Image (spheres, rainbow, N blue to C red):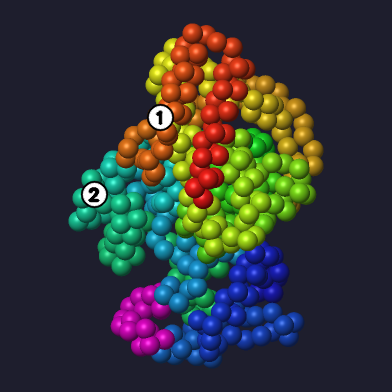
Amino acid sequence: MAREERKWHHKFIQYMDMIVNNQNYRGLRIEKKADGSYSWIATAKSETGKARIAWCENKAKELGIPIQPGVYADVMLAIHPTKWKVCQTCGCEMSLYYHYPNANFLKSLNQTFQSDYTECDHISDIWDDLIANGICNERIAAFLISKGGLSLNSCTASKQEVINALEYACRKGNKKCLGPGAMSNFPDRFDGFHTYNRCCRASQDKGRSKENLKSYTKDRRAYEYWSDGNIHAANQFMGSSFFDGISADHIGPISLGFVHDPRYLQPMTTSDNSTKRDRLQLIDIEKVIETEARTGVYPMSWYSRLIWEFIKEHYRNNVSKIPNAYRDALKQNMANFMYILWYILRYAPQNGEGFLVHAFLQPNFKYFEYSYSFNKLGEITSKTPRHFTDRNSNETERYCRIAIGAVYDFSDKENRQLTPQITSEEQRTLAFICAKIESGGPCGEIKEDVCTLVDKIQVRIILHI
Ligand SMILES: [Zn+2]
């Protein structure tokens, strides 16, 4: 046993520590070994095992969970502080809920959507990825509803409703579509779950990892927001071993205009794992400022630069404005910027797309020409030229396709979270710009016109903060 424990992943050791010291487990028996480490494992027949069972049944009464088969799993899930468990073998983190496709369901899913997901892809990530690949919400909902025999309407049910209902039907009902990230195993394990996760089950197909899928979805989001920064290095860093078992998170949300760059990425904390982060917080602003000072890499995409400069100058005396007024200003600016892009595509049908690609996307192509190495902070320690294969040129093509596609998607009222606000004077300038684009005016000059307009809009937004 000792030999086995020695190779436990360091993240699992941290996880055990976090659990043992969490107040939810106060009184649950665990022995300490001579070397000070915990005896995580105990058999049901041992004194420790019996004490754990008594404790758990008592906890069930406290929580109002009936004592019947499955009670230990219910209690240990209910009290688990994060509902995400670290794998003893590989250190990766998986949901304790029934969130992962089982074999038969997976086969049918992959056939239906011509996808190649694995048993370790979280159903929520799969959903996002299908959306990213152009499948509509309703189709995904309809598929899951029919598989789970759920009484929900695919036209009206939200992603969360469908996933929650399917998860429950599989965990507590007789549906077999989804399984948990770790099987329950009480009292043998202190937290009540197998030490290894689904990822390291013997039979496990080790295809794509959850992280790869996540990063795929994320780089796509950066393209959608026309984010600046070294976008290729950011993608590479997100997929690196530094983020094994944890997701990468933008310190400044890209949905607010911050850059997609390795220096502005950090590991996402467990508590943030399931929430979409487009919040703006004091701690993030200060981290962004520190990072800029340390690296010299500008944190904001060009179209939100003035608002960022304003925030930087004033946030200290206006901390209460950060989560609302400042965030809203950046969000509104993003909506306006997307509108400008859409307007150009719509009213410069001949040359508009070519102009936008040339003026605003092509300058970022250079980042795809290198492979990068990083230190822990995401700083680039070396770069080597890549051989330009077909795959590389596909990357810039995909970048443009996603960026342009997102502008059209944005114009769908359904997808729009915020109405653009453009004054009639700005509107006239925009029409003038489109005429200039269609008449084949010089790209550099028209780009200047667009930047001037975007700056003017930002100045107007700043006046109302
Ligand atoms: Zn594992």
Residue 8, position as x, y percentages in the image: 66, 66
Work out whether residue 217 can be spotted.
no
Residue 253, position as x, y percentages in the image: 55, 48
Q: Residues within 10 Å of mark 2 (few under 14, many from 20)?
A: few
Type of amino acid under label 1:
Ser
| Residue at x 56% of width, y 22% of height | 449
Question: Tag 2's secondary structure?
Answer: loop
Work out whether residue 80 can be spotted.
yes
| Residue at x 65% of width, y 70% of height | 13
Position of the N terminus by quadrant: bottom right
Magenta-drawn stretch contains 461: no
**71 lies left or right of 120:** left
Type of amino acid under label 2:
Thr
Q: Earlier in the sequence, mark 1 or mark 2?
A: 2
Given residues 181 and 304, the one toward you in this image is 304
**76 lies left or right of 207:** left
- Residue, disc 2: 156
The boundaries of the magenta stretch are: 59-75
